[in-house]
Amino acid sequence: MAETIYRKDYQAPSHWVDTVRLEFDLDPESTSVTSTLSVRPNLDLDTPQFDWVLNGESLTLVSVALNGTPLPETAYTLTDETLTLHNIVEPCEVTIVNRFSPQANTALQGIYVSGENLMSQCESQGFRRITYYPDRPDVLARFKVVIRAEKRRYPVLLSNGNPSDARDLDDGRHEVVWTDPFPKPSYLFALVAGNLVCQRELFELKDGRNATLEVWVEPRDLDKTAHTMESLKKSIRWDEERFGLELDLDGFRIVATQDFNFGAMENKGLNIFNARYALANPKVATDQDYANIESVVGHEYFHNWTGNRITLRDWFQLTLKEGLTVFRDQEFSSDMLGEESARAVERIKNVIALRQSQFREDASPMAHPIRPESYQKIDNFYTATVYEKGAEVIRLLQTLLGWETFRKGFDDYIQTNDGNAVTCEAFLEAMERASGRDLKQFKRWYSQAGTPRVTVMTDFDPKTGNYTLQVSQSTPATPGQSVKKPFLIPFPVSFMSETGDPLPVRLVGETTTSTDKRLFELTEERQTFVFTGFDHEPVLSLNHGFAAPIQLEIALNDTEGGMTAEQKTDKHRALQARFERDAFVRWDALNQLMLQSLRELIIHDIPGHHAEPISRTLMDAFDGVINDATISPAYKALLMTLPSETLIGDSLTLIDPQAVAHARQRVRTELGSRYSTSLNELVEANLTRGDYTPDAESAGRRSLVRVGLDYLMAATDKHGQLLACELAENATNLTDRLTGLTMVNQTRLQRKNDLLLKSLREWMSEPLLLNKWLAIIAGGPSMVGEDPVVDRVRELVNCAFVSLKNPNNVYALVLTFFMNNPAEFHRLDGQGYALWLELLEKTDKLNPHVAARIARTLENWRRYTPALADQMYMVLNDVLTRRDEFSPGVIEIVDKALNNPL
Ligand code: PHE
Ligand code: ZN
């Protein structure tokens, strides 16, 4: 049983390491490491500790020496996970020699083989798979790294910092030395060896220095580095201008690998990237890929200050670097878009992602605050909560304090903490100093899990013209937290008339005439706001730009002209869908109308009872959007998109994935056939003609084409189908080709198999493309008369060109199926769950991190109809009863899924 680690148990390290000299003799079968550490006991501890415990996993210890003298075995204790040196009472030099096998390392943590190359991944606890070391983020040391390897096989040898020496050795080997001038924790160590080539540029920094920027790839990928290099230069410039932060090294390197558990890693001066976030050209990358690369390159680069120069005291503080850095990369991406409406589109996409992953997590047995209080495997806490909600919490500060004060606090944070390993308090304290505000209540965002529910009851009094909001907030119980205190929530409010005219936001007793939205703050469980000055009942808008990560419920009073509250809510949403000035609120209104229609359809979907699939109100709103030429294509695409099956499911008391898919399909079909003419026109008008560029404007047009075609497919529109085939076969850009294939895959056209096979043949030898193809199959529907998707996924898993050792293959095929195809995964016959168990077992033996991600796809089992929940319980329980056969990370998830009821 894995032990639980608690935040409250933090203890400062018993010893400090000032310098590290690592000598590597690289060999894929058996690499040897000689590590020389200058060590001193931490005498600031209340009771200094002289046993020095080093972490080490899957290592073979060769020797230990103290100040040059070999230690007898009695001077240390070795276990599977630690090496304890006894009696380290004064500063000394420890030399450890050990070995490990990169080849045998399929977990992809530590140093492993990727293709013909060697790569490292140390966050969070991978360094201990390289050598014995105090593998914790609060031990900061200066690293010097000597790498020796066969020159023909590994001509390029990279590590952190600056290259300081290189020479050839006899016997065909060579040696390269790297020195990193900045003290760092072990999780930021990196090493790369291989036959790599690079795109290199000199880039002038703000202070006039020239930095060498390099993007390292396999030779076959040298035509895919340009966008990554551009993104890196933009990131450096942006951090200088927006946050006043400069690159602190002479060089900055990015390396791409096809084998990587996460997206990318911010190792000091040597970022390692999953190939999907580092390689692009028009043949292998979609609009989304281009955008993702810019944002991930930014993210990792921004970590150089928020994460590396200022690092974490312990892993519970993960959001200190991740939440803040996601916030920074989001700002970067939207600054690169420039235009206000494009920024709004970006914001809405982030909100959709947050609701779909983080809100879901908040409602699960894995729910945790952005700073968790305990964990078994820290690997399981690289979550949407720590990252995306963490970024929202930083955004809340920016909203509450305003940009200028926020920036002042940020600068203070950097200056005060540079070079240190700190806690989340350091950030909040800097914000307190800058603003003069007490952030005690705000801090609850760091300790309370769950999505706050804000309920607003309205009342309009025509006699006084007063409009009253009774606002209450509450946060549902989460595992280990039954009672919650109120949060500090920024609360923007605005009003408009039924003809779309903005109205003043004026509290009783005030004299303002401003019609701009106004920012209030919620601090209590219940609060009342009385606005005044209305001739008629106004239309109320709240939470502009999704100011706070809350679930908002507005209950309108029902005293108007015999309308029910529901009818009035519908009417107001329709008015907002038409007139609202805040792009998020407008989109959300239409989205809620869609969700409402879908929910009604599901709830009343009793056999024999044919409910009208969509209300008149929704139809009118949809109609208004399709034909509104003033709406940008990207925004229109978002406005027209139905909520995903996952989001619809999560809004129900009990999830019945087939009913959800069925309802969504009916609404799509209905809208698709009713508006087929307009949709065809829209698609035609926005088709890409001429050269491809991934800029936001033309990407927006392509996303609109996709949304339009998606409706036309549901309506089996002949013209739409023809166009889909045409795109699948002949589109000159990858985005449109994938749109075409995705659409064709949901038809029963004769040419379907030919088109799918043709693209598979063409794409098989390019991993980036193969993964896209796999995701189309895994995410598609089962068509009558064809094999169900679950069978095709199983077949593909066993194909020679798919490997369970490769995380990207698993994510594209397996996780797409388990996460994004609920109706096909949650089959009543249990085939999906059988596949889940089979793949969990297989991947766990190879890569426990990947397996834990698979495990998480059933954690919400209690939310489903009993027929499904019972079956999920059975497979989960099967895992738990055989707990010794699974990795601790998987067991943590399954155990919490079964035993952490909400
Ligand atoms: N720190 C990385 C990031 O957010 C994510 C990561 C975590 C990568 C663990 C690898 C391993 O940019
Ligand atoms: Zn990060």
Image (cartoon, rainbow, N blue to C red):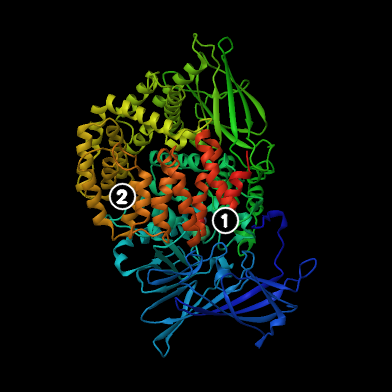
* Secondary structure found at label 2: loop
Residue 302 can be seen, yes or no: no
Q: Amino acid at mark 2?
A: Pro
In the rendered image, residue 382, in percent from the top left (x then y), is placed at 54, 53
Front residue of this view, candidates 773 and 95: 773
Which numbered tag is attached to residue 694?
2
Tag 1 near tag 2, CB within 8 Å = no
User: Count the marks: how many?
Assistant: 2
For the residues marked 1 and 2, what is the alpha-carbon distance in whole angstroms? 39 Å
In the picture, measured across the screen, residue 278 lies left or right of residue 525, that is left
Indicate which disc, 1 or 2, sits on the residue closer to the N terminus. 2
Q: Is residue 895 visible?
A: yes
To which residue does mark 1 refer?
Answer: 889
Looking at this view, name the residue that lies furthest to the right. Answer: 47
Residue 759 sits above or below residue 116 on the image: above
Classify mark 1: residues with Cα within 10 Å, few (<14), some (14-19) or many (20+): many
Q: Quadrant of the N terminus?
A: bottom right
Q: Which of the 4 image quadrants contains residue 674? A: top left
| Residue 50 place in picture, x, y as percent | 75, 74
Give the residue type that dot 1 points to: Gly
- Furthest-bottom residue in this view: 170
Depth check: give the residue in front, 829 or 170: 829
Image quarter (top left, top right, bottom left or bottom right) of the C terminus: top right
Image disc number at residue 635: none
Residue shown at 26% from the left, 38% from the top: 747
Q: Residue at x 65, y 54 (%)?
A: 426
Is the residue at mark 2 in contact range of ligand 1, meaning its CB lies under 8 Å from it?
Answer: no
Q: Position of residue 69 (x, y in %)?
A: 67, 88
Q: Quadrant of residue 231?
A: bottom left
The residue at the point 59 percent across, 76 percent down is 20
* Label 2 crowd (10 A; few <14 / some 14-19 / many >=20): many
